[in-house]
Every structure is written in structure tokens, then in C-alpha cells.
Amino acid sequence: MTISAFKRVGTTLLVVWGAVTLIFLLIRLAPGDAALVMLGPTASQEQLAALRTRLGLDDSLLTQYVIFLRDLLQFNFGNSIRLGKPAMQAVLERLPATLQLTVVATFFSLIIGIPLGAFAGRRPGRMLDRAISSIALVGKSIPGFWLGVILILVFARELRWFPSFGAGTPAHMVLPAITMILPFVAIVIRLTRASVVDTLAEPFIQTAHSKGLPEAQVMRYHVLRNSLLPVVTIVGLQLTTLVGGAVITEAVFAWPGIGSLLVESVAARDYNVVQAIAVVVTLMVVAINVSTDLIYVRLDPRIRLGGAQ
């Protein structure tokens, strides 16, 4: 268990290092002059040169990278050029909005997707199964940005049921949450259905029926419990996609989370904020993967961390 824990910590550190290094290279090798973007086309050559020196852009890429890693070890990302405050403070101020949206989307995706997938898998090939599977296929095929625009046009502009952008009330969350829920719930339905169909074909399910157990009891304690194992694994992986997908949804609905902050910071070449967001998102993805492993062990006690039985 101790060796497994050390391996997990080592893997986590490597993932964080790889992610922040990739972000560092991408934003510095991107075309365009960062100083020109920040000061605008009317800035003089003296002003541009002074800003490049202040940001360290005159240093070699290797020197910038060494300084970046040194500050990273101190969890110091410097100040945001655009916002005039510490970069990590700017990220932490916007993080609760992203977590709120992600948690709501995940919760409703699971409580909608798992029952529908179980109903469809319980009687495969019947009308209810075909209807639910068709809805899931449509939901999986719709691009998130396109769905967001359609929801704004129909429910915000025409019907005026919900606000089209911003935050502050539960109504502001409805449209962005639906945009994130629909593709995710489609995946949960398809996974649960396939897993239930496979589990129903197992011999121990036939044994449970031969003992005269009620159908509801067989589904609850034997079928669903075993069917959730592969679902939990894939849902954990999809959650990392959901965190990344929040960038598009927040940009479409002007939701004040780290996704919209990332878009604004990339456009303004605010390197420090972009790097701080990369570290926070990477840590969130690692935490989701670790939580998935723990839930997996909880659902199936035969599995132990590190592969030991």
C-alpha cells in the first residue's frame, strides 16, 4: 500500500509537470507579440521594450522556463497583467462558479442517465429501449457550442424564460447546465444500458431468479451493483472532459468561471493567469481520477489499490 501511494504521488507530480510545461511552451511559442497585445497598436517602441523587459520576455526560453519552475515550486504565479492582482487569487475567485456548474451537471447527468440506461438494458430491443437509445444517440451527437446557441435563441430570446448570460440566480444556471448535461447524460445512458445487458446474461443472475428473488431485488442488489463498475470508470474519465468542456460553455453563456477567465487571459496574453489555471485544472483532473479509484474499490471489495488482492 505504501509503495502504491508513492507511485501515485510520483505519477501525479509527473502529470502536473507535463501539463504546466506544455502550457508554458504553447503560450510562449504562439504567434504574435505579447507586449503589443497588452499595450495596443498605439504603443511606442520604448513602451513595448520596457514591458518586454519587465515581463522577462527578453530572456531566452530556457531562462524563462527555469524561472517559471522556480516560482511554481513556491506556488507563486506572479501578478495578472490585465487584472492587477495575484494570478492565483484571480483563479480562486472564479473557481467556485466552475465547480458549481460542474457539480450540478454531474449530479443531474447521473440521476437521469443511470435509471434510463437501466430501463433500456432491462428489456433490450423493445420500444422503450429503442426510444431511450435514440435519444442518447442524438444527445451524444450534438456539439455543445451549437446546443448552447440554440438554447439561448429559443429559451432566452424568443420565450424569455431564462437569462442568456451571466450569473447570480438559479435561473442563470439552467441553460449552461443543460448544455453540459445533455452530452454527458447520453454517455451515461449508453454505458449503463450496455453494462446492464451484459450483467443480465451472467449465470449468477439466473441463479438469483431461480431462488425466487423478486425482480426489483435482483435488479437493485445484483444487476445494478455489478453494472456500475464500468460506468464509474468511464464517468470518471468523462468528468475530466466535462471540466475541459466548461471552457466552451462558460464562454457561450458568459459564466464567470475559470473557463471564461482562460479565454480572456489567452486573448490578452496574460501568461501568469493561464499558467495558474493550467495547474488548478490539472490538480482537479488528478483528484477526479483518484476519487474514481476509491469509488471503484468501494463498489467491488475484491479490488485493492496497487493491484493486491
Image (spheres, helix red, strand yellow):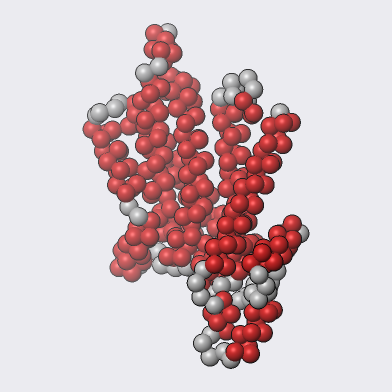
Q: Residue 295: which quarter of the image?
A: top right
Q: Which residue is nearer to you in this view: 186 or 171?
A: 186
Determine whether 89 is above or below 132 in the image. below
Q: Residue 144: which quarter of the image?
A: bottom left
| One can see residue 28 in this view | yes
Residue 146, x across and y down, in percent: 34, 60
Residue 138, x across and y down, in percent: 29, 47
Determine whether 258 is above or below 139 in the image. below
In the rendered structure, the answer to whether residue 80 lies left or right of residue 107 reads: right
The residue located at (50%, 46%) in the rendering is 239
Residue 135, x across and y down, in percent: 29, 43
Q: Which residue is nearer to you in this view: 18 or 90?
A: 18
The residue located at (36%, 37%) in the rendering is 190
Q: Which residue is nearer to you in this view: 267 or 59?
A: 59
Residue 273, x across and y down, in percent: 62, 67
Q: Residue furthest left?
A: 127
Determine whether 109 is above or below 304 in the image. below
In the rendered structure, the answer to whether residue 306 lies left or right of residue 140 reads: right
**Which corner quadrant holds the N terminus?**
top right
| One can see residue 212 in this view | no
The residue located at (58%, 62%) in the rendering is 25
The residue located at (57%, 89%) in the rendering is 43
**Which corner quadrant holds the C terminus?**
top right
Q: Residue 124: which quarter of the image?
A: top left
